[in-house]
Structures are given as C-alpha cells and as structure tokens.
Amino acid sequence: MAEKLTIDNISTFCKSKGFIYPSSEIYGGMSGFFDYGPLGAELKNNIKQAWWKFHVQDREDIVGIDASIIMHPNVWKASGHVANFEDILVECTKCKERYRADHLIEEALKIQADGLKADDIQKLIEQNKIKCPKCKSALDKPGAFNLMFQTYVGPKQSKESIAYLRPETAQAMFVDFKQVVETARLKLPFGIAQVGRAFRNEISPRNFLFRCREFEQMEIEYFIHPGSWEECPYVDEIMDHEIFVYSAEMQQKKEKGKKMKMKEALSDGIIKSPWHAYWLATEHKWFVNLGANPNNFRVRQHLPDEKAHYSKDCWDLEYNFPFGFKELQGISDRGDYDLQQHIKHSKKDLSLFDEETKKKIVPHVVAEPSQGVDRAFLVFLFDAYNDDKERGNIVLKLNPRIAPVKVGFFPLMNKLDKEAREIYNCLRKLFVCQYDKSGSIGRRYARADEIGIPYCVTVDFDTKEKKEVTIRDRDSTKQIRVQVSELKNVLYRLIVGEVEFEKAGKLIK
Ligand code: ATP
C-alpha cells in the first residue's frame, strides 16, 4: 500500500475513473449507498466470480445457493435479528448528530468497545466526560437502535405484512438446509455458500465502501458432525501458512501480536480448533492469491465480551486500512445455535441421520466465513494503487484475473485502425478489451495503467508484413513480440498466470 494513501484518495480516484459513484448524486446522494460504474461493476463481478470459483466450484465439499432477499419474517425472529440486531446509538443534545456509541468510545478512548451494553457506554461517557465530537456539547443517554430495514409485502400495510430486507445472506443456508442436503446429496463435513445483497440501516455509514447501508456478502456456513470438532481433513494444507496472529490473551495483556505459522498457532493452543486455523488461513490465501499484500492482514480473536453468547470462538480476518486494522471477514464457530433456533420456530426437523450411530444429529457450524464484497473491493484497490513518480501516473497493479479490462488495443497510427480493429474484434469476444486510438502511445499506456489494464497490444507496420504485434506488461513496462496467430493463447496464459511475461514471447531489448 502506498504511504499516506487515504480512504478519501481512493474514493476520489474511484469516482474520477468510473469505478464508483455516490448513489443518486444528481439528487444530492444518499449516505451509505453507492453505484458501481462500468469499471467498478467489472471489477466487483470478477471478485465475486473468483470467490465463487475458489470456494464453490473448485471444491467438492461446498455447494452454492441464491436465495431471495426478502424471506419470511419469522426467519428473523428465529435468528434473533428482530429482537437483537442492534447497535447502541447516542445523540448530541444540541446539534442532534447521531453516533454509533461503540465507535465513539473507540475513537475517544482507543479501546475495543464492540459488544458493550448501553449502561456500560453511559458509564464510560460520564467517567471520561466524552462530548459530541462535532459541537462539543453534552451527549444524551445511549439507547439501542435496530439495524433492520423494514418493509411491507403486498398491498395492505399492516402489522401482518411487515417484512425485512435481509441484513445478512447467512440465514438462507439454515432455512434451506434440509432441501440443499437432500437434493445435493451432501455428506458431513460440507458447506453451503451464497453471494448476495444485504441491507443494514447503519447509524453512521462512513469510510466510503467500508460501511454502507446496502452491500454484498460472500458467506459460507460450514457444517460438521457435532463430535468431530478436532478432525479437519484439510488442515495439512495450511500448516505452513504464515499470518499475523492477535489472540484475545495478547490483546488483554496489551501485547502486539505475532507472525506465526498455523502449526505453531495450533500447537501453542493460540488457535484451538484446526477448523478455525484452516478457514482463517484459507481466507487469507484467497486474498493473497489474487494479489493482496500478505503483510497487510492479521487474524484477531474476539474478546469474551465481543462474541455472541452461543459462539464457541470467533476470529476476524482484519486488514490494515488507513483508518486502522478493521474487520474484513468474521469467522465464527456458531455451534448448532442457528439450526436449533429454526427447528424450534419452524417446528420442522432439520436434523440429519447418522449412519454410524443410527441416531439423529444436528450438525454444528464450525466456521462461518462471512466476507463483505465491498470491503474486499477496497482491499484489492488499496494494495494495487501505486503512484508511480517515474512514469508520472497512477499504476493500478490489479491481478490480471480480477482486472476490469484485461487487454488494451492500440494502433500505432490511425492508418493501422483497420488491422488493429480486426484483431480487437476477434479477441474482445474472449476477454474484456478496450480499444484506444486517441493521443500518443505514451498517453494511451498511462490511461491503461490508471485503470489497471495488465496487457496492451500495439499494432504496428510489421503487423501487416510479419503478422506480429507487441504486448506491453503494465507492471514492468517490458514488451514482447508475438505472432498474431498466437495472441489469443498467449494472452490467456498471461491472464491466468500460467506463464511469465518474459517467457511468453520474444523480449524486446
Ligand atoms: P462491523 O463490526 O464492522 O459492523 P459486523 O461484525 O457487524 O461488522 P458481520 O455481521 O460479521 O459484520 O458481517 C460479515 C461481513 O459483512 C463483515 O466482515 C463485512 O465484511 C461485511 N459487512 C458488514 N456490515 C457491512 C457494512 N455496513 N458495509 C459493508 N460491509 C459490511
């Protein structure tokens, strides 16, 4: 990450290049809502597809669903969201600004305040004489605020027709559990995944995409046999994976945390469950494989006050944003809480039959990797953004697999427009391409760098005679010559990372 790059820099950059705009801007915008522009929509889709491929299609043990956003209102009663999905709100007595109380405390006192109750917050405000950060007046008594967006279904607006926009995608994996298991013929351990929109009426949306009121999630509920907490068949894959670990004990002792291999974290009892270690490392690997800087991440264990009462253990994968280490993904061990809640409220049998013991069992969720798409989008942008002083332009070093445009096509001169277009028209059916014939070649390369196009193909006079083109690599600016007949194949191998750039053609010295 470039030094001193702020969230405002990224937001301005995104707007100027067509990645993201504030929603409904011509009407003054709406806080917490954003529109993804042409490049943003491509990048976001690529992130979601890469997630789906890695977590669902490339694995035998995870299947995906795509459930409706509005579900039966009893789903949210059973899950506890109607009663408890709240943040503590505190209002200024004078300017009436409203704050999310835990964030206010965290900023004023530099302590972890997630999970504190209204009474504890009131005490901290009084003891530390915390005032309204905006006008310095006294703050009112804190109170609970439910984050669910409520709506009505059907033409009658009555108590009976109240429904909710889902605040998370997760509940559908429990509600559809039995049908998914039966139709996909799943055997434990297995996961059910979903990518989709979620809505939360956040008290104070801020930090651009980090905290929005409408966002997307990529979530997995991973189920195991209740008695197999220690048996993770995949754990060997991650034993040597290294990550910065920040356990609850380290936080309580005001220590700094430690970079360690997963095998060390497990053998020292810092991470207790091999499943947890597996999912934390796997999620970190997903980001790193797609070009994120491994050193900008840490895994942080929830403090006892922070975790839900039913959760055995919970770790967050965090990223070092310019505004501090913040949650990217929560990975919680939820036990059988959710399935039991839905069994109780729906009165349906959601248990599975254990062939060995010939008894019914209710599987446990050993991990619930729950990742926000928009926060992942920010991570990839932060780690790709390079203000290259030598080139005099921004170079967005996105991994080619997620880059919104894969190939730029430039005729060296306008005279070569016909030849260049012919090749472009052929290849744009295979990759997202951009054609650019205006301005000097240098200017065109700079424009391509700024939006992260990894490869640019220049059509020159030799293209006609020798049937060759030049490919320029965004990150090194090196160039190779390749045969037009080979171009499709070479570009594909470069994009998926199958070949090194210098070995993909004749290097131009
Ligand atoms: P936070 O403590 O930051 O409010 P949370 O613990 O409430 O997050 P979860 O309920 O665990 O978040 O949601 C899972 C993931 O969904 C988060 O890790 C994050 O990536 C994403 N997410 C949650 N709320 C938002 C939001 N308001 N805007 C964007 N992404 C979000």
Image: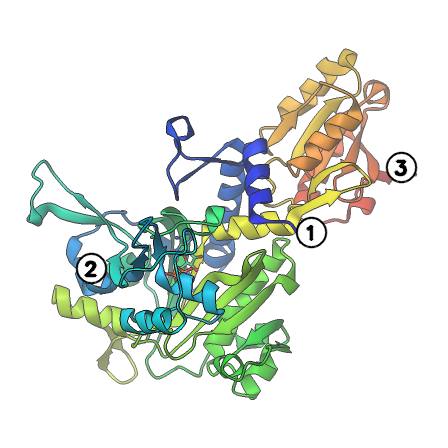
Q: CA distance from mark 1 to mark 2?
A: 42 Å
The residue type indicated by label 2 comes to Val
SS at circle 2: helix
Q: Are marks 3 and 2 in contact (CB under 8 Å)?
A: no
Disc 2 crowd, CA 10 A, few/some/many (<14, 14-19, 20+): some
Q: Which residue is mark 3?
A: 508
Disc 3 crowd, CA 10 A, few/some/many (<14, 14-19, 20+): few
SS at circle 3: loop
Q: CA distance from mark 3 to mark 1?
A: 30 Å
Mark positioned earlier in the residue sequence (1 or 2): 1
Relative image position of residue 300 (x, y in whole percent): 51, 72
Image quadrant of residue 63? bottom left
The residue type indicated by label 1 comes to Ala
Pick the quarter of the image with the C terminus.
top right
Q: Which residue is mark 1?
A: 2
SS at circle 1: loop
The residue type indicated by label 3 comes to Ile
Q: CA distance from mark 3 to mark 2?
A: 64 Å
Q: Is residue 49 left or right of residue 121?
A: right
Q: Is residue 489 visible?
A: no
Q: Are marks 1 and 2 in contact (CB under 8 Å)?
A: no
Please tell me which residue lies in front, 33 or 42: 33
Q: Is residue 128 visible?
A: yes
Compared with residue 356, is residue 339 higher up or lower down, i.e. above or below?
above
- Quarter of the image where ligand 1 sits: bottom left
Q: Is residue 138 left or right of residue 152?
A: right
Q: Which residue is mark 2?
A: 82
Pick the quarter of the image with the N terminus.
bottom right
Frontmost of labels 3 and 1 is: 1
Relative image position of residue 429 (x, y in whole percent): 58, 29
Please tell me which residue lies in front, 20 or 286: 20
Q: Is residue 485 left or right of residue 310?
A: right
